[in-house]
């Protein structure tokens, strides 16, 4: 075995741009610190805001490859948004508690519901996404994705009092718009009709108006698809066209009974 030859071949094929996996690890640490600062009673807010600023500076050094971009200015704007984010997350937790008969306490929602955790990390990442901070918001939501099975792109727009029940398998695309008081169940996909790089700057994912409930494994596709307010989308439904307000949509299975 020619060890040097193998090393040279590996280096020749290692054509990726600057790729430092410390960014991924540091983002996960930052996300954990952020979550505990907002919710854990034993995590002092003042002390940990200073710690978060240090962690964020480290992320800036790793993530901001274009030195002309004012990444260092983002932190102050972000901290100013944290009370607003926390207020929204408290509304999300209250929506879960009031909607789910299995929830025994608000403490259980904050600590045990994967849907709440996924929403929390999405909301914390979305503000950074909207400020144009590169890569970190996506790493934050992918961290939550890995832990919960919920894939929410940080670019999605989600209103108040959002409820994801059971959570696993939910997919919400980058240009999806979800209004207020929406409930979705496990396996729901809010996706694009098809994938093409030329569509990057277009709305590819559906709009869900207020007070809509979407049951398990329903798939709703397309940027022009709008689910009208107060509608109920049944489990396993497949939708690529808009639905008017106050609609009920359901999938009817075909049942064939085998006879001798």
Image (spheres, grey):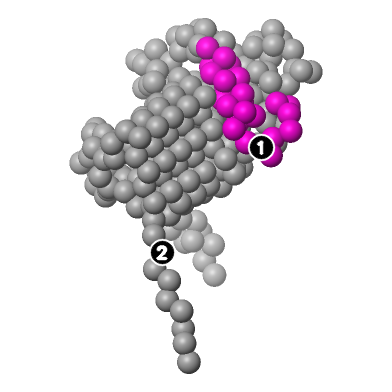
Q: Residue at x 52, y 66 (%)?
A: 2
Label 2 belongs to which residue? 253
**Residue 122 at x, y = what percent?**
50, 29
For residue 40, side relative to residue 145 (left or right): right
Q: Residues within 10 Å of mark 1 (few under 14, many from 20)?
A: few
Residue 49 against residue 246 in the figure, above or below = above
User: Which residues are drawn in magenta?
Assistant: 84-107
Disc number at residue 101? 1
Pick whichever, 190 or 148, lies toward us.
Answer: 190
For residue 80, side relative to residue 255 (left or right): right
Mark 1 touches mark 2? (CB < 8 Å): no
CA gap, disc 1 and disc 2:
28 Å
Pick whichever, 101 or 68, lies toward us.
Answer: 101
- For this orientation, the residue located farthest to the bottom is 260
**Residue 98 at x, y = what percent?**
62, 28
For residue 44, side relative to residue 226 (left or right): right
Q: Residue at x 47, y 61 (%)?
A: 5
- For this orientation, the residue located farthest to the left is 198
Q: Residue at x 44, y 24 (%)?
A: 180
Per the image, is 197 magenta? no
Task: Work out whether residue 206 can be spotted.
Answer: no
For marks 1 and 2 on the same chain, the one whose residue lies earlier in the sequence: 1
Residue 23 against residue 67 in the figure, above or below = below
For numbered disc 2, what is the local secondary structure? loop
For numbered disc 1, what is the local secondary structure? loop
For residue 170, side relative to residue 68 (left or right): right
Task: Work out whether residue 258 can be spotted.
Answer: yes
Quadrant location, the N terminus: bottom right
Q: Residue at x 53, y 47 (%)?
A: 186
Question: What's the magenta bit mostly, secondary-structure-wise?
Answer: helix
**Residue 22 at x, y = what percent?**
57, 34
**Residue 50 at x, y = what percent?**
65, 10
């Amino acid at each position: 075995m020619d060890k040097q030859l193998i090393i040279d071949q590996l280096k020749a094929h290692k054509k990726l741009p600057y790729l430092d996996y410390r960014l991924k690890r540091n983002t996960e640490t930052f996300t954990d610190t952020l979550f505990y600062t907002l919710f854990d009673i034993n995590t002092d807010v003042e002390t940990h805001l200073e710690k978060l600023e240090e962690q964020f500076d480290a992320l800036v050094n790793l993530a901001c490859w274009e030195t002309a971009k004012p990444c260092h200015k983002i932190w102050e704007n972000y901290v100013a948004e944290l009370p607003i984010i926390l207020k929204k997350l408290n509304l999300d937790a209250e929506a879960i508690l009031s909607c789910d008969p299995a929830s025994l306490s608000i403490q259980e929602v904050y600590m045990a519901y994967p849907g709440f955790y996924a929403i929390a990390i999405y909301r914390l990442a979305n503000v950074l996404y909207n400020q144009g901070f590169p890569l970190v918001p996506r790493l934050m939501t992918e961290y939550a994705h890995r832990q919960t099975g919920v894939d929410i792109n940080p670019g999605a727009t989600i209103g108040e009092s959002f409820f994801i029940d059971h959570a696993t398998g939910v997919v919400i695309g980058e240009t999806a718009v979800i209004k207020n008081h929406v409930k979705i169940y496990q396996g729901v996909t809010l996706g694009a009709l098809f994938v093409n790089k030329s569509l990057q700057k277009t709305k590819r994912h559906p709009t869900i108006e207020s007070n809509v409930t979407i049951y398990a494994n329903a798939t709703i596709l397309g940027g022009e698809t709008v689910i009208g307010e107060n509608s109920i989308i049944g489990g396993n439904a497949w939708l690529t066209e808009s639905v008017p307000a106050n609609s009920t949509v359901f999938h009817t299975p075909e049942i064939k009974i085998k006879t001798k």
